Image (cartoon, grey):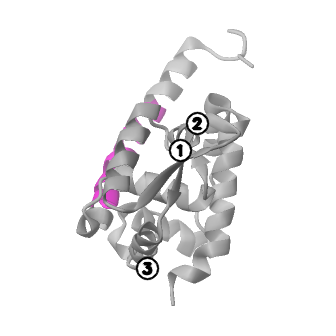
């Protein structure tokens, strides 16, 4: 669904794109720093943690699905998953009815690591969370993601957003297991 040139001006398009680029870069920089600090004690990088997280919620997923939801190339997802397998956190398998795809599952050791990471999350160590607190105090809730989700849906498609929403539904259901 692309709009016609009559729906917006080139300048509106340019300014929107530039604002989105600048804000996304600024936000990603702090998110990346916070994420790296959170997982540093566990000797993981962001891709490895993301793969563990996605695998936890998708359970038995093909590597291609992990790559898609993790917004990474399949070879990147495969290589980091292999490293995690060598550390005992993941296991690879093939399905008899689907020998072309490689599936990954968390091992018990991988699940224990991920739950430990979740349990040790400290909200006030997260800059984005702290940045959103004034909005929470003012409105009684955190910002909604509806507009950002609509943009991502338009770029990556309905399948991506369905898996994304499914994984976060599972996060909410499983959150009772994180804190004992």
Q: Nearer the viewer, residue 179 or 94?
A: 94
Q: Identify residue for label 1.
A: 66
Q: Identify residue for label 2.
A: 101
Q: Identify residue for label 3.
A: 119
Asked if the stretch drawn in magenta spans residue 133, the answer is no
Magenta highlight range:
19-36
> Dot 1: few (<14), some (14–19), or many (≥20) neighbours within 10 Å?
many
In the image, is 116 to the left or to the right of 59? Answer: left
In the image, is 133 to the left or to the right of 177? Answer: left
Quadrant of the rendered image containing residue 73: top left
On screen, 117 above or below 53? below
Which of labels 3 and 2 is toward the front?
A: 2
Q: Is any part of residue 73 visible from this angle?
A: no
Q: Secondary structure at mark 2?
A: strand
Position in image of residue 66 (x %, y %)? 53, 44
Position in image of residue 87 (x %, y %)? 31, 60
Residue furthest to the top: 5
Position in image of residue 56 (x %, y %)? 54, 62
Residue at x 56% of width, y 71% of height: 136
Disc 3 from disc 2: Cα separation: 33 Å
Residue at x 62% of width, y 74% of height: 174
Asked if the stretch drawn in magenta spans residue 23, the answer is yes
Q: Nearer the viewer, residue 4 or 88?
A: 88
Quadrant holding the N terminus: top right
Contact flag, marks 2 and 1 (Cβ < 8 Å): no
Q: Earlier in the sequence, mark 3 or mark 2?
A: 2
Our reading of the magenta stretch's main secondary structure is helix
Q: Nearer the viewer, residue 138 or 62?
A: 62
């Amino acid at each position: 669904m692309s709009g016609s040139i009559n729906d917006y001006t080139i300048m509106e398009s340019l300014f929107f794109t530039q604002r989105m680029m600048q804000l996304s870069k600024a936000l990603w920089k702090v998110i990346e720093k916070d994420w790296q600090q959170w997982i540093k004690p566990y000797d993981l990088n962001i891709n490895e943690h993301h793969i563990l997280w996605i695998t936890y919620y998708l359970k038995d997923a093909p590597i291609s699905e992990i790559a898609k939801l993790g917004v990474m190339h399949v070879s990147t997802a495969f290589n980091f998953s292999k490293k995690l397998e060598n550390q005992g956190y993941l296991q690879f398998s093939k399905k008899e009815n689907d020998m072309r795809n490689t599936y990954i599952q968390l091992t018990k050791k991988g699940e224990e690591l991920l739950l430990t990471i979740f349990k040790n999350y400290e909200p006030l160590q997260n800059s984005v969370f702290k940045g959103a607190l004034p909005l929470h105090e003012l409105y009684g809730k955190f910002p909604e993601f509806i507009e950002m989700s609509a943009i991502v849906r338009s770029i990556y498609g309905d399948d991506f957003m369905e898996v994304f929403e499914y994984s976060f539904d599972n996060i909410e259901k499983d959150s009772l297991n994180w804190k004992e």
